[in-house]
Image: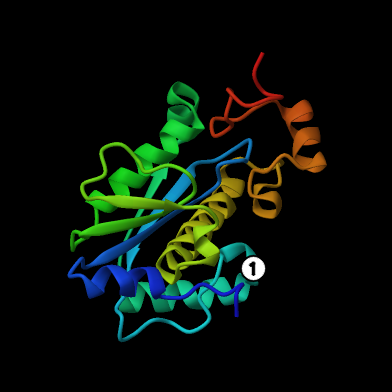
Amino acid sequence: MADQPDYSFETQLMSVGTAPVAGIDEAGRGPLAGPVVVAACILDANHIPLGLNDSKKLTAAKREALYEQILATSHASIVSVSAQTIDSINIRAATLQGMAQAVRGLAVQPAYALIDGRDVPPGLPCPGDALIKGDARSVSIAAASILAKVTRDRLMVRAAEFWPGYGFERHMGYGTEAHLDAIKRLGPCPIHRLSFAPLKG
């Protein structure tokens, strides 16, 4: 199926001796609150969990199940970049910094990285390619997208306990009407991104 990610990018690289290959993706570039979370993942070619896909196309229950399977069968590294860092260096730079950090955090260092999006992060410890809609094309990137999304959702559910009233456990920090109303009522909290409209200025 054309809309399902596969292992072809990885297989092509491995066929010329470039291995292992890591997939990299993030969750949370757009929200008004919380960190951006980045994951790097090296799948075991012989134990690729079934059903890997862009995390946005999966149910929460399916993401949770795959999250556990990915961690049990793969090398993975997950990095959370705070709202304060996002405010100080901007979301793009914070995301790319997190990506390079996640790859460096892998127990096994990859020979190549496949990155979701348009940018190859500066400071990446190996060569890499940026793939537009990579989480729908490469299972390694899809796996990283699931790790990042589940981790970030769990962090936002925990944040709702520390800062009640914003509804973080429901909207995960995105700029929903309920979230905007809560900001008007309560003001921003320490995990809000003050450089993002409508919070800035």
> Considering only vertical position in the picture, is 116 above or below 20?
above
Residue underneath mark 1 = 57
Residue drawn at 43 percent across, 29 percent down: 85
Q: Nearer the viewer, residue 147 or 183?
A: 147
Question: In which quadrant of the rendered view does residue 4 lie?
Answer: bottom right
Q: Regarding mark 1 in the picture, which secondary structure is present there?
A: helix
Number of disc labels: 1
Question: In which quadrant of the rendered view does residue 76 lie?
Answer: bottom left
> Considering only vertical position in the picture, is 160 above or below 193?
below
* Residue type marked 1: Lys
Question: What sort of colour scheme is used for the picture?
Answer: rainbow
Is residue 12 found left or right of 58 in the rendered image? left
Residue 145: x and y in percent read 49, 60
> Considering only vertical position in the picture, is 149 above or below 197?
below
Q: Quadrant of the N terminus?
A: bottom right
Extreme-top residue of the structure: 201
Q: Nearer the viewer, residue 201 or 136?
A: 136
Residue drawn at 21 percent across, 47 percent down: 125
Q: Quadrant of the C terminus?
A: top right
Is residue 57 found left or right of 130 in the rendered image? right
Question: In which quadrant of the rendered view does residue 40 lie?
Answer: bottom left
Residue 15: x and y in percent read 24, 75
Is residue 22 found left or right of 153 in the rendered image? left
Residue 45: x and y in percent read 31, 80
Mark 1 Cα-neighbour bin, 10 Å: few <14, some 14–19, many ≥20: few
